């Protein structure tokens, strides 16, 4: 019998960058444990990591190319698949134009070394502007703020959580997410360490989240009122003479515009809409400004709403005007070993107004249109209409707003190709499915999330297992697609070649960092804590931070209008819907893990006791939740962690459609929150989907079971 071996790698299911120690023998996994020697994750993992073995061995995984026929799915060769794809796509583009073929990129692409490096090449070969991704259903407001304030969409500042004295968390739940757009394993431990050293954590959220429960204080806010609160905090800092730009004095432009604009958003004016008393808002501003160091972190609840762009802009403004930007314990720029800013030249973010989508005129940003309008672009006839699609590692039927309409749209395409490991709610519409490797079968280096990490780590892990069946790595699939679309020969480039070149020319080149060096350190390298480096990271023409870009100032009348409630809407749809993330799950594909479903529990709608009493419903009863675009039936969970008037439903579920090949998920289908969310509700400034704050009505239906 072969010997037991140990493999070290970084988990690539979410952003936390947890180090794993995997014991295996003869191709079988014996255990997955935290890597206690990983200098970044420091021996932490969450329950999701153990599911990597489920995905590797899952009998439901697609392992050979499939073609849909009138009699079902049939296996075909890679040569057959590429030949048909090349012929069909070229014919559609020749007849209808390059933009008649769209691309959707799902969240797992961001965690895949090969895809991160080769997707731009594929997009160039396709020649279509119609690219969509999960980013516009998630973090796009972060990138828009970074672009217009710092000159680069990937110039993202993150909390220096391990050294701060005061952390204000708005719409984020890092105890569950492990720090979305703030990569850092073991967030619960980091927050407790902050408090142990005498610091304070304040959470602003309509729900008393898992993070709020360990915080120093929780303040319940009404959905979509976060930008009003942020402006009121900024106004208080200005009124009370607490502005301090610190070492950025002379390198910040536009403060006078902030001082003028904030005058309309005093705590007294916004408190009714926010749901927090004016004196408490002022006290929070004073505490934040007076702390030795402080940082404001705004995340999903503040991004996936109608004012997501303003929220992320004002978050940066608050950190800057209180002297908590680009300093220890504040908001800081990471310096990743593979630096995505390396080739970004100094520029004027306002030099070129954004292009607009064909149907709804939503903004085109960073090479893509908002996913909220993808169904419009498929269903609306005319020049530029999408008639064919590529979906790569994504399931937008469950993850995009008004997924039911997108389900209808995909069914009407002339041709569709999916690169995926599962037959899911989206890929069931494909004509051809190309099976990719995943998880333990791919090499791992995190290209994107090292750019958002709370320290500067670097770690490379080779594949643990070879692919089974006829699967290929995503980057190999992309190269095959490029060849069948363009006829170009393979140039022999691999992800490791590109990674090594980036490391050797990156910020740690003087330390001799290379792929070979990383390979000698299987636990990874700690390249040090965050350090002040705004002078290196900011890419505006003059190197200054642009505190008041016109894009945001011009959106303020819309924010002012939000102070006045729509009486008609409140009467017809008196509740506001927010999402909820479960610690045992991540994206829709993780629902096919038997280990993760053990901890999922029932998919419920959480209601405050007073709302349940008013509706006459009890725990376990099924209610009908209805929005402008759809409705669903779901079991009630009564929970005083909820703000009255708010209902919370987990995201990513709804595995009830026919012809799905995910048997474990189908046994625990839940409901899709995106049967309620409205593709018409977006943040018009960024185009990001406005999931949170969706107006809904609730009525009693029947008893569960």
Image (cartoon, rainbow, N blue to C red):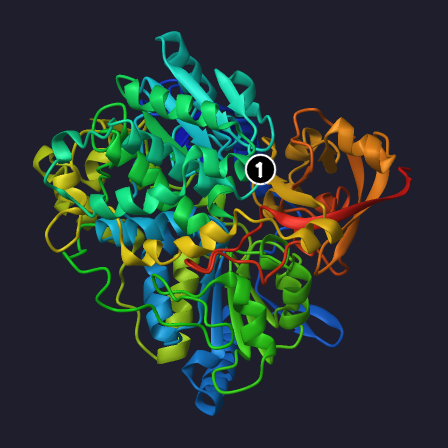
Left/right placement of residue 425 relative to residue 17 reads: right
**Residue at 25 percent of width and 35 percent of height:** 320
Left/right placement of residue 365 relative to residue 566 reads: left
Q: Residue 536's image quarter?
A: top left
Give 428 or 481, whichever is nearer the viewer.
428
Q: Residues within 10 Å of mark 1 (few under 14, many from 20)?
A: many
Q: Helix, strand or loop at disc 1?
A: loop
Residue at the far bottom in the pictured view: 95
Left/right placement of residue 528 relative to residue 6 reads: left
Q: Residue 98's image quarter?
A: bottom left
**Residue at 47 percent of width and 38 percent of height:** 269
The location of residue 608, given as percent across then percent down, is 73, 30
Residue 163 shows in the view? no
The location of residue 186, given as percent across then percent down, is 44, 22
Residue at the far left in the pictured view: 510
Residue 496 shows in the view? yes
Give 405 or 324, whichever is nearer the viewer.
324
The location of residue 531, given as percent across then percent down, is 18, 29
The image shows residue 651, relative to residue 410, as above or below, that is above
**Residue at 49 percent of width and 63 percent of height:** 104
Count of marks placed on residues: 1
Left/right placement of residue 291 relative to residue 225 reads: left
Give 695 or 188, whichever is nearer the viewer.
695
Quarter of the figure that contains the C terminus = top right
Label 1, on which residue? 222
């Amino acid at each position: 019998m072969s010997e037991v071996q140990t493999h070290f790698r970084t988990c690539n299911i979410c952003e936390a960058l947890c180090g794993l120690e995997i014991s295996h023998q003869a191709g079988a996994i014996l255990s997955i444990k935290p890597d206690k020697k990983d200098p970044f994750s420091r021996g932490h993992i969450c329950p999701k990591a153990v599911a990597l073995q489920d995905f590797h061995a899952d009998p439901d995984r697609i392992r050979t190319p499939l073609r849909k026929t009138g009699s079902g799915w049939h296996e075909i060769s890679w040569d057959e698949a590429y030949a048909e794809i090349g012929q069909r796509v070229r014919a559609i583009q020749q007849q209808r134009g390059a933009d008649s073929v769209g691309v959707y990129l799902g969240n797992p692409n961001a965690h895949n070394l090969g895809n991160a490096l080769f997707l731009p090449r594929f997009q160039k070969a396709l020649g279509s502007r119609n690219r969509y991704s999960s980013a516009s259903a998630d973090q796009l407001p972060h990138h828009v703020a970074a672009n217009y304030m710092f000159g680069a969409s990937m110039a993202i500042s993150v909390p220096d959580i391990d050294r701060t004295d005061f952390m204000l968390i708005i719409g984020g739940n890092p105890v569950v997410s492990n720090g979305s757009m703030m990569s850092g394993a073991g967030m619960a431990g980091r927050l407790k360490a902050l408090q142990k050293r005498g610091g304070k954590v304040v959470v602003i959220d309509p729900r008393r989240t898992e993070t709020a429960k360990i915080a120093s204080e929780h303040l319940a806010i009404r959905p979509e009122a976060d930008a009003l609160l942020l402006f009121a905090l900024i106004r208080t800092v200005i009124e009370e003479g607490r502005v301090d730009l610190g070492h950025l004095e002379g390198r910040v432009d536009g403060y006078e515009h902030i001082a003028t604009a904030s005058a309309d958003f005093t705590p007294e004016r916004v408190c009714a809409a926010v749901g927090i008393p004016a004196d408490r808002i002022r006290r929070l501003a004073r505490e934040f400004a007076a702390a030795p160091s402080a940082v404001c972190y705004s995340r999903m609840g503040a991004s996936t709403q109608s004012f997501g762009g303003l929220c992320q802009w004002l978050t940066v403004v608050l950190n800057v005007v209180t002297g908590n930007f680009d300093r220890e314990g504040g908001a800081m720029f990471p310096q990743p070993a593979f630096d995505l800013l390396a080739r970004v030249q100094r520029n004027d973010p306002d030099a070129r107004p954004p292009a607009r989508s064909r149907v709804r005129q939503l903004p085109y940003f960073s090479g893509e249109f908002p996913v909220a309008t993808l169904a419009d672009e498929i269903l609306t006839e005319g020049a530029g209409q999408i008639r064919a699609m590529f979906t790569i590692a994504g399931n937008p039927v469950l993850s995009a707003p008004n997924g039911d309409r997108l389900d209808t749209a995909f069914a009407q395409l002339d041709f569709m190709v999916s690169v995926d490991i599962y037959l899911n709610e989206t890929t069931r519409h494909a004509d051809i499915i190309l099976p990719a490797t995943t998880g333990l079968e791919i090499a791992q280096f995190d290209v994107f999330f090292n750019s958002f990490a709370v320290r500067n780590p670097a770690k490379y892990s080779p594949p643990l297992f070879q692919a089974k069946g006829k699967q290929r790595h995503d980057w190999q699939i992309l190269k095959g697609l490029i060849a069948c679309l363009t006829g170009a020969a393979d140039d022999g480039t691999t992800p490791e070649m590109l990674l090594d070149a980036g490391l050797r020319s990156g910020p740690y080149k003087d330390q001799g960092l290379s792929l070979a060096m990383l390979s000698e350190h299987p636990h990874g390298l700690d390249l040090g804590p965050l350090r002040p480096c705004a002078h290196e990271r900011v890419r505006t023409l003059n190197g200054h931070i642009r505190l008041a870009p016109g894009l945001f100032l011009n959106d303020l009348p819309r924010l002012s209008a939000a102070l006045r409630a729509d009486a008609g809407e409140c009467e017809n749809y008196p509740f506001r819907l927010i999402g909820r993330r479960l610690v045992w799950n991540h994206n829709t594909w993780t629902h096919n893990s038997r280990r993760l479903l053990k901890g999922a529990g029932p998919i419920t709608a959480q209601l405050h006791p007073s709302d349940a009493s008013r509706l006459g419903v009890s725990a376990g009863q099924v209610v009908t939740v209805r929005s402008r675009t759809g409705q669903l039936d779901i079991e009630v969970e009564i929970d005083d962690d909820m703000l009255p008037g708010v209902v919370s439903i987990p995201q990513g579920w709804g595995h009830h459609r026919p012809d799905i090949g995910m048997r474990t998920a189908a046994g625990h289908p839940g409901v899709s929150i995106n049967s309620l969310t409205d593709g018409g509700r977006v943040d018009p400034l960024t185009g990001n989907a406005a999931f949170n704050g969706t107006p809904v009505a609730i009525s009693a239906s029947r008893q569960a079971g």
